[in-house]
Image (spheres, helix red, strand yellow):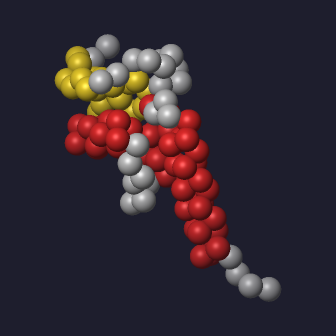
Amino acid sequence: MGNQVYSRNEYIIIKMNRGFIVINKRKPFAEGHTHIKTFKTAKYLVDLAIHNSMPYNLSLYLLTSLTRISENETYKRKILDLIANKRNRGLRRYRRSA
């Protein structure tokens, strides 16, 4: 296991060999953690989850990570809607008309 490098509210960030793990201590580990490459991004996810901020510019992976660590069901639904919209937007762009 790695070393804890950051703690805020119920969230901790642990340094691992190839990046960081963000953990929500109030959720079971299997459901409440995510793997992130950089400390700056890990800390940003923690801040977003604490403030329930909508991050429209994040990748699908980071949005999914945010749903894993968040406990607020309303916030998670909004992020899942954003993920669905981003996926649909991507499909529309590459479809050919018959």
Residue at 52 percent across and 20 percent down: it is 30
Who is closer to the viewer here, 90 or 23?
23
Residue at 23 percent across and 17 percent down: it is 3
Q: Is residue 65 left or right of residue 91?
A: left
Q: Looking at the image, which residue sits at the far right?
A: 98
Q: Is residue 54 above or below residue 31?
A: below
Residue at 21 percent across and 25 percent down: it is 6
Question: Is the N terminus in the top left, top right, bottom left or bottom right quadrant?
Answer: top left
Q: Position of residue 64 (x, y in %)?
A: 50, 43
Q: Position of residue 97 (x, y in %)?
A: 74, 85
Residue 10 falls in which quadrant of the image? top left
Who is closer to the viewer here, 20 or 85?
85
Q: Is residue 11 above or below residue 90?
A: above
Q: Is residue 97 left or right of residue 48?
A: right
Who is closer to the viewer here, 24 or 41?
24
How many numbered marks have been drawn onto this rendered protein structure?
A: 0
Q: Is residue 89 left or right of residue 33?
A: right
Q: Is residue 10 above or below residue 97?
A: above
Question: Is the C terminus in the top left, top right, bottom left or bottom right quadrant?
Answer: bottom right
